[in-house]
Image (tube, rainbow, N blue to C red):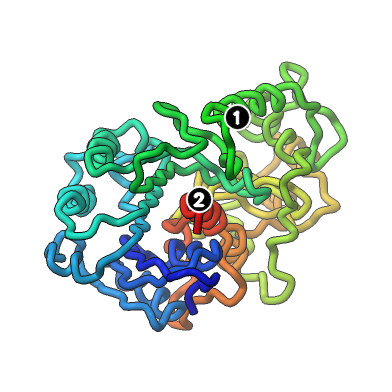
Amino acid sequence: MEARCGAAALRVLELYSGVGGLHQALRESCVPAQVVAAIDVNTVANEVYKYNFPHTQLLAKTIEGIPLEEFNRWSFDMILMSPPCQPFTRIGLQGDVTDARTNSFLYILNILPRLQKMPKYILLENVKGFEVSSTRDLMIQTIENCGFQYQEFLLSPTSLGIPNSRLRYFLIAKLQSEPFPFQAPGQVLMEFPKIGSKNPQKCAIDAEKRIEEKKNEPSILCAGSTPCSGKEAILFKLETAEEIDRKHQQDSDLSVQMLKDFLEVDGDRKPYFLPPKSLLRYALLLDIVRPTCRRSTCFTKGYGSYVEGTGSVLQTAEDVQIETVYKSLTNLSQEEKLMKLLMLKLRYFTPREIANLLGFPPQFGFPEKITVKQQYRLLGNSLNVRVVAKLIQILCEQL
């Protein structure tokens, strides 16, 4: 059922729909709207989308295969889209406009000025790095020529008190002559604007102020009692003193919820515990968090299959000091090291727990035939629902 708040429903076109994160965010925003069509070529993602949004027209086709006439028939008021991020990601080849995966988005930019009815609103999500791409420059040129006012953001769910770092680029654009009240020309804002803000520079200034305040905050250990800062830090694992200090500061930020608020209470956790081989091989690279921590790293599509850099793992033995275990690993045999590491009872977050951190409601689910590995992959490619919902509210404030 679509959002209904007493006003005429916006007709929304959802491009690169995935599992439906944009659709879910639209619901959460309570902006009156109807998704007239969703489009994605990923057949597995489409199965999940249909499972959760069975009444929405879902097209499994390439965007560049849709003629202008069909776009015109949809007569949409809003475009929500999350184009492929691979051409812009920092660990990729950064092919930008030369990457074939950008073709569909370039097609959208070509179609936009030729529509019979120009949409009133646009929201786009992508990875950090998109903001410095040639594709972004072409997009800005196109929407400016079409008469849109726009604002760009780099936002993480931690801004909404969610203990997960997932920094993403966002653009919101509105077809109007007057700028947004919070618009900061030439600046990418690092926090949400206050709705109704009169000062277009305030968000940027507040973001800088918060960064300075963070530098001066006391450092508190999540898993121990010894302060850790600068050269006095007792290092363990492959982390610098600055990295450890940053994590401790994150865990002391009371504006962010604890991870335990997002964890499943019931269910079998045995399949999610790290196997001995992974424990021994990646022990020094793991980002380990506890239920009482207020942070976790970005979960990627490789989570559960790969260990390094794909997301945090959870220490379920909360009475065991992680520093004590790691400092005792020196000069031990592999078997002895494994026995020490097993004391921490480290496990992967379940797909449901990651979905919770991404803002998907409890009723959002996966068809039985979708494997755990596929769920991790789909969630790793998704977006944070609550962040997008907040931006939709800001974009459609007058509604």
What residue does disc 1 label? 207
Q: Report x, y in % for residue 314.
A: 68, 55
Q: Amino acid at mark 1?
A: Ala
Q: Secondary structure at mark 1?
A: helix
Disc marking residue 333 = none
* Residue in front for this viewpoint, 113 or 132: 113
Q: Report x, y in % for residue 100.
A: 17, 48
Asked whether residue 251 is in view, the answer is yes
* Residue in front for this viewpoint, 13 or 232: 13
Q: Residue at x 25, y 72 (%)?
A: 60
> For this view, does 62 lie left or right of residue 249?
left
Q: Residue at x 56, y 30 (%)?
A: 199
Closer to the chain start, of discs 2 and 1, is 1
Q: Secondary structure at mark 2?
A: helix
> For this view, does 63 lie left or right of residue 246?
left
Q: Report x, y in % for residue 340.
A: 74, 49
Say which quarter of the image contains residue 215.
Answer: top right
Say which quarter of the image contains residue 273.
Answer: bottom right
Q: Amino acid at mark 2?
A: Leu
Q: Report x, y in % for residue 324.
A: 80, 40
* Residue in front for this viewpoint, 285 or 203: 203
> For this view, does 241 lie left or right of residue 47?
right
Q: Residues within 10 Å of mark 1 (few under 14, many from 20)?
A: some
Above or below for 73 versus 341: below
What residue does disc 2 label? 391
Q: Residues within 10 Å of mark 2 (few under 14, many from 20)?
A: many
